[in-house]
Image (spheres, grey):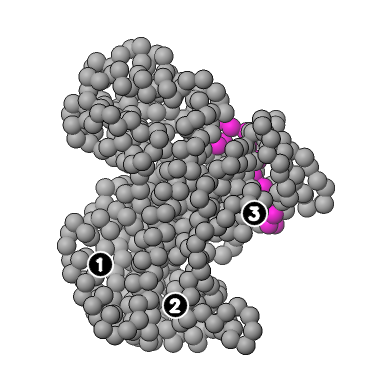
Amino acid sequence: MTPTVLIAGAGPVGLTAACELARFGLAARIVDKNERRTDKSKAIVIWPRTLELLDRMAPGFASQFVAAGLKAPGTTIRSGKNEIAHVDLTQIDSPFNFALLIPQSETERLLEEHLVSLGVRVERQTELKGFEPREDDVACILVHSNGNSEELPVSWLLGCDGAHSMVRHTLGMEFHGETLLNDWILADVHLKGAPDVPEIQIYWNSDGVLALFPLGARRYRVIADVGESQGSTGEGQRPLPTMADVQRLLDTRGAGGVVAFDAVWISPFSINERKVTEYRSGRIFLAGDAAHVHSPAGGQGMNMGMQDVFNLSWKLALVSRGLCAPEPLLSSYSEERSAVAKLVLEATGKATAMAVLQGGVRQTIRNHVASWLLGMAPIRHAMADALTELSVGYSSSPLNETSTQAPGGPEAGKRAPIHAYDKPVGTGDTPRFVLHTEREGVPAELLRKYSAILEPEVRQPFHGGGIWLVRPDGYVALTTKSTDWSTVLDYLRRLSAA
């Protein structure tokens, strides 16, 4: 079967895309030039919104990730032994009220195993070497491990091939942004004497920042800045970090009494904050690090990439099946996700700048202001929603219908609330929208005429007197008062128009 989609790159983002497209019945191939998936921990946080979307992929799928990881119910910021602020995640409005700390190697394993269960295998040691966009398809050139080339025409090409994306470079898309001036150290080590609490611990010190992420069995991810960048080459190059460096950072910036041993991985890194302006060029799309790279502050990068393809996959499925008009459905991908990435880049950049702030007086002011602000419940809750990505939404999306607002409940573009009576939407071969309103009064014509893209089961309303139309990725597309069925019919007509 000729594939509809070619996915370049089999990291978490590419694997998520392949799983979603296979769930929706699209023929897809996924290739990766590496011999095997990563054995490194790399990105170690999955936030609640991503877990919610994984659970939509297959009932109970998120529980497999939870079983393989460690639940962190909150984050504490300290200066030495003194607590500055605590962000509690247990009160957020999600069935996953925690940060899940799990090595990327496990995330990739679970996604790949699920993909195999859907009948798709990653083609490893297979590299996308070139492509040519054409009016009706994209002509791709693949090179296999034996050196043989393959010409492959596909309807859509999805570049999930990382920060050095061949797809992005070939398209000539600029990666706007900057490289921050500080050098950093990342270490996966075992710690003795660390606080025996499963939470993310951040220490603000006069020398810089230290962050500890527990991974279970005394294993921790340690991240710290180590001063102004000395360059990657020449006499000024900083020596590779060692266990002695890790121990010194723990001694000088932490609460004391913590001993590092049995290193798994120690590496230097620098922080890039960059993104493309457009995520789409005709039949070609970028996602994940190919489209945006972030500061590790907040651990948003991998989650953002996975949510890119949750956003795109259902749109490609509906357009490829001829159930929806290509526009504005496909162009909305870039508009929606680029706006989200812009906000996240700004937020993580500010968080990084605050953490590495220098100067005793400025640090004292920072600590007092942070303690005061996060002492207020509304700000603490807002920060928890931002950190967990529950506040991510598409308020300016061209897919929103905003002419009339329902009396209460979520607005168009917002994440739809998740309730115990919900079941995953878009299961089976076709992603579908869902109506939330009182069953009485729903026009039979609407359910019959748009049955290809609308779930037959009407769900409970989010508030009395309203109608909500929820997208297959769990965001509100339309909201209006309960008698305004003409607006709903007009929206579905425009969406499904040929």
Instruction: Give the amino acid type for the residue marked by disc 2 in the picture.
Output: Asp
The label shown at residue 86 is: 1
**Which residue is found at the position 36% from the left and 16% from the top?**
446
Q: Which residues are magenta?
A: 21-35
Of mark 3 and mark 2, the one earlier in the sequence is 3
Marks 3 & 2, CB-CB < 8 Å contact: no
**Which residue is found at the position 46% from the left and 22% from the top?**
496
Separation of marks 3 and 1 at Cα, in angstroms: 42 Å
Q: Is residue 373 left or right of residue 265?
A: left
- The vertical placement of 406 against 373, above or below, is above
Q: Residue 497's spot in the image, x, y percent?
A: 47, 20
- Please rate how many residues cluster around mark 3, counting C-alpha atoms within 10 Å: few if below 14, some from 14 to 19, many from 20: few
Report which residue position mark 2 lands on: 225
The label shown at residue 169 is: 3
Front of the two marks 2 and 1: 2
Q: Does residue 89 appear in this view?
A: no
Q: Nearer the viewer, residue 183 or 193?
A: 183
Front of the two marks 3 and 2: 3
Of mark 3 and mark 1, the one earlier in the sequence is 1
Instruction: Give the amino acid type for the residue marked by disc 1 in the picture.
Output: His
